[in-house]
Image: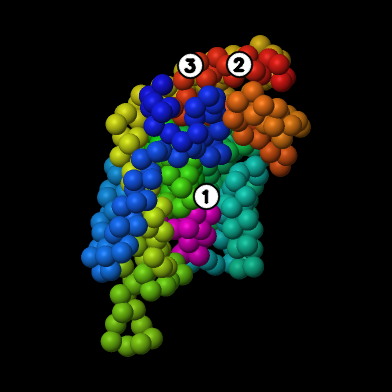
Amino acid sequence: MLYPKSDFVGLEGVHHLAAGGETPMLKSHFDAMAQFAADKALGMPGRERFFAVRLRAAQQLAAMMSVDSGDIAFVGSSSAGINQVTHALQWQSGDEVVVVDDEYPSGRYAFVWLRRFGVSVVMPAYHPNPDDELAAIIASLTPRTKLVYVSHVSTRTGRRIDINALADAVHAVGAHLIVDATHSLGIVPVNASNIDFVVCSGYKWLLGTHLGILMWNRALVDQIHPPVGWRSAKPTLAPDAYELHLDAARTEVGNPNFIDLYILDNALRYMNQVSIADREIHALLLGETLYDMFESLGHQPITPRDVRHRAGNICVATDRSAEIVREALVHSLVIWGDHDLLRIRCSVHGYVTVDDVTAACKIFRTLL
């Protein structure tokens, strides 16, 4: 255990392995929300404090991804971030986009929407071996490829793919790469210095709430032209003109959700008391125990065993996912599963203990 369970709401007497769906709230988040409420009452000085917190959160995220703090923006969700990137690029008939056929729907749907502009959607097939999947994506690249979307860690299978090797191949054909780091940022290292765009949800491994993070790597992509709102730009003398912000703030069409930023800032400061290397080791070691347990019960995980190819999630295919989740709750075991993806998912965050995993293994021997 890296983080005391007593620091969280609702973990007393519970074995919580559902970080890939929702993480519990930190008790200190209530202090962060109280500070937001106090600052909100101050008028303009309070607004200045809002943006100071936004900057602090951006700086922490930038350090985690090895990019500049000006590359970080905050939007409504990771799905909103994907759409901002999709709409920010200039499309022509004949352009191609690449996305694996089992990718997160927000990426697939946004790309299919582009067909109205004559853009072709190339969907290489999911492969259980991440190296083979990476090779399939790279084989799909052509001089017409404009954008590739990939999850660093798959929401369905828990596999981790080599995003930096993919970035090299994508850039070699003159295309851009957008990485969804929702299931990696905060639990395993994410070096985005060679990645064009990153999106991430704040409410999972980052211990925050429901906001979206968008990283635009300005060192790699010098210009984007997203849909704009008042927050995206500075006014000019002409009422029908504006000047876009030079940094990623141009993707924030309005105020970011400041109360979520107060919570995220608190969460990041809390998490950074433990190194990302220690968080990764913790997740991989306890994940190995879960992996062995599922195999011993005759349920081969769809997550790769190789530590290079997994992060905090261990996933098992089943058509009884919703039933198993309900039955697990009876035994005070919190896991994630749904009918759509036909799998259950166990997630190891820093508050998960050896005892939690041991108990989970005993419970699963009953449920499976």
Mark found first going from the N terminus, 3 or 1: 1
Residue drawn at 53 percent across, 48 percent down: 149
Label 2, on which residue? 361
Q: Is residue 350 left or right of residue 219?
A: right
Residue drawn at 23 percent across, 65 percent down: 45
The residue range painted magenta reads: 73-89
Magenta-colored stretch includes residue 79? yes
Residue drawn at 39 percent across, 26 percent down: 4
Question: Depth-wise, is mark 3 or mark 1 nearer the camera?
Answer: 3
Quadrant including the N terminus: top left
Label 3, on which residue? 354
How far apart, in angstroms, are the residues tagged by discs 3 and 1? Answer: 38 Å
Q: Amino acid under label 3?
A: Val
Q: Where residue 59 sits: x, y (%)?
A: 28, 48
| Mark 2 neighbour density, 10 Å: few (under 14) some (14–19) many (20 or more) | some
* Vertical arrangement, residue 254 with respect to residue 60, above or below: below
Q: Of residues 107 and 23, which is closer to you in this image?
A: 23
Secondary structure beneath dot 1 equals: strand
* Vertical arrangement, residue 89 with respect to residue 170, above or below: below
| Mark 1 neighbour density, 10 Å: few (under 14) some (14–19) many (20 or more) | many
Q: Where residue 169 sits: x, y (%)?
A: 46, 42
Q: Residue furthest bottom?
A: 238
Residue drawn at 74 percent across, 32 percent down: 323
Mark found first going from the N terminus, 2 or 1: 1
* Vertical arrangement, residue 21 with respect to residue 260, above or below: above
